[in-house]
Image (tube, grey):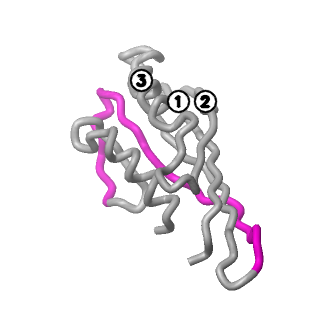
Amino acid sequence: MNPDEQALEARFREAFDLKSNQVLTLNKPSTNPDKNKPWVRFSVSLGNRGRLTNGENPTQLQLGGVYLQVFVPKSLGSNGGDALIEKFDKLFTDWRSADGALQIGNMDRNYSENPDSYQHTIRFAFSSQRPRG
C-alpha cells in the first residue's frame, strides 16, 4: 500500500468504528452486512501518476479518489444515511495530510436506487506530491 492509501485509510479508521458501523473495505475479508441497517463501503482508487521533477529522488504526482458508498434500506427512507455522509464529508473536505503532501478538495455526491436500498456514492478527488521513494 502506498503512503497516500495508508494516510487516507488511517484517517477513515480513526473516525469510523468498523465494527459498529458495518463498514466494508476493499482488500479485506468479505462480510455480509445486515441489510436492515445502513452500511458503507470505503475504498481508495489510485489514478494517474507522473513525475514532476527529475534527478536522483524525483517528485511524483499521484491523483486519485476516496469513495464512500452508503447503502440505506428503503424501510429507513432515502435520508437514513445522512449522518454517515455528513461525517465523511467533515472528515475529508479540504483535508491535508500531516506532511502536507496529500490534499483533498470538496465532495461529489451521486444518488441511485437499488431494489432494496438507496445508494449514496461520495467521492473526493485527491492529489499528492511526494518524492519517489
C-alpha gap between disc 3 and disc 2: 13 Å
Q: Earlier in the sequence, mark 2 or mark 1?
A: 2
Q: In which image quadrant can residue 18 be found?
A: top left
On the picture, is 10 further left or further right than 85?
left
Q: Which residue is mark 1?
A: 120
Q: Position of residue 51 (x, y in %)?
A: 74, 71
On the picture, is 75 further left or further right than 124?
left
Residue bounds of the magenta highlight = 29-54
The one of 53 and 50 positioned closer to us in this rendering = 53
Q: Is residue 111 above or below residue 49?
A: above
The one of 57 and 122 positioned closer to us in this rendering = 57
Q: Is residue 69 above or below residue 85?
A: below
- The amino acid sitting under disc 3 is Gly
C-alpha gap between disc 2 and disc 1: 7 Å
Residue drawn at the location 36% of the way across and 17% of the way down:
75
Q: Position of residue 47 (x, y in %)?
A: 67, 59
The one of 58 and 115 positioned closer to us in this rendering = 58
Residue drawn at the location 31% of the way across and 60% of the way down:
29
Q: Does the CB distance between marks 2 and 1 fall below 8 Å? A: yes
Q: Which residue is mark 2?
A: 109
Q: In which image quadrant can residue 6 be found?
A: bottom left
